[in-house]
Image (cartoon, grey):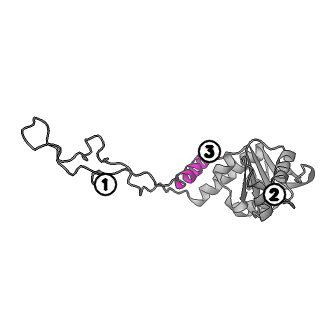
């Protein structure tokens, strides 16, 4: 059986009307999804987004403790030199985070590309909407929301454009359930975390070129 070369989908305008069709590259939008690559890509992105801000004080950083709690001998208690010892309540911490932890991990390019293709394939099967052109003359939020209503998107939507221009940026910035990204900044986390994927025709072509 010959391998499928393309996937045909409808192209809508921002009013939700069908204006044409587009053939999606099957090597990008119709691959065999690789769950492991997608899992690794999510783990890499989330780990690399972590900030090493956690910090505990070791014994020399805790204030106080300059005076010996009691004399060395004759009290019947164990020897103690300072109340800032790690064995004391309020003392320093042993083996705690020091503020320079490195959470960075990586994924090779081929695996990451497969992860993105896998996520795009899942969306192409379920909830991909291709729009002829995404632009707004008035730059108003209501215009962006009207487009989403016309396209009948889900509760969370990712809008991918070839270039984030001022009109799209202004119109979308107050819409909390929608995220707008450029075609060169599509992540696996974003793709898997939304109900609907909306892409402009130009963004589709740019993504295909980048992942071929």
Residue 212 visible, this orientation: no
Left or right relative to 141: residue 212: left
Left or right relative to 43: residue 68: left
Q: Position of residue 103 (x, y in %)?
A: 47, 54
SS of the residue at dot 2? strand
- Residue 169 inside the magenta-drawn segment: no
Q: Rounded to the nearest whole Å, what is the CA distance between mark 1 and mark 3?
A: 46 Å
Camera-nearest label, 2 or 3: 2
Answer few, some or many: residues within 10 Å of disc 3's Cα (few below 14, many 20 plus, some between 14 and 19). few
Residue under the point 83% across and 51% down = 142
Answer few, some or many: residues within 10 Å of disc 1's Cα (few below 14, many 20 plus, some between 14 and 19). few
Overall secondary structure of the magenta section = helix
Q: Quadrant of residue 207?
A: bottom right
Tag of residue 61: 1
> Of the residues under marks 1 and 3, which one precedes in the sequence?
3
Q: Which residue is mark 2?
A: 200
SS of the residue at dot 1? helix
Asked if labels 1 and 2 touch by Cβ distance under 8 angstroms, the answer is no
Residue under the point 74% across and 52% down = 174
Q: Position of residue 3 (x, y in %)?
A: 77, 51
Q: Which residue is mark 3?
A: 35
Looking at the rendering, the stretch of residues picked out in magenta corresponds to 31-48
* Total residue callouts: 3
Depth order, front residue of 182/122: 182
């Amino acid at each position: 059986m010959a391998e499928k070369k393309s996937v045909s989908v409808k192209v809508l305008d921002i009013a939700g009307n069908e204006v044409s069709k587009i053939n999606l590259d099957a090597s990008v939008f119709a691959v065999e999804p690789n769950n492991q690559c997608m899992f690794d890509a999510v783990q890499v992105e989330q780990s690399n987004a972590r900030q090493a801000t956690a910090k505990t004080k070791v014994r020399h950083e805790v204030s106080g403790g300059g005076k010996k709690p009691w004399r060395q001998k004759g009290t019947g208690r164990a020897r103690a030199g300072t109340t800032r010892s790690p064995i004391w309540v309020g003392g320093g911490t042993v083996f705690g985070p020091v503020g320079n932890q490195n959470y960075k991990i990586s994924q090779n390019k081929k695996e990451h590309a497969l992860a993105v293709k896998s996520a795009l394939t899942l969306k192409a099967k379920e909830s991909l909407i291709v729009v002829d052109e995404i632009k707004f003359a008035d730059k108003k939020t209501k215009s962006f929301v009207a487009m989403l209503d016309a396209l009948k998107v889900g509760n969370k939507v990712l809008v991918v454009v070839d270039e984030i221009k001022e009109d799209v940026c202004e119109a979308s910035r107050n819409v909390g359930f929608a995220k707008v990204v450029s075609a060169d900044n599509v992540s696996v986390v974003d793709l898997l975390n939304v109900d609907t994927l909306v892409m402009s025709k130009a963004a589709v072509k740019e993504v295909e070129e980048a992942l071929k």
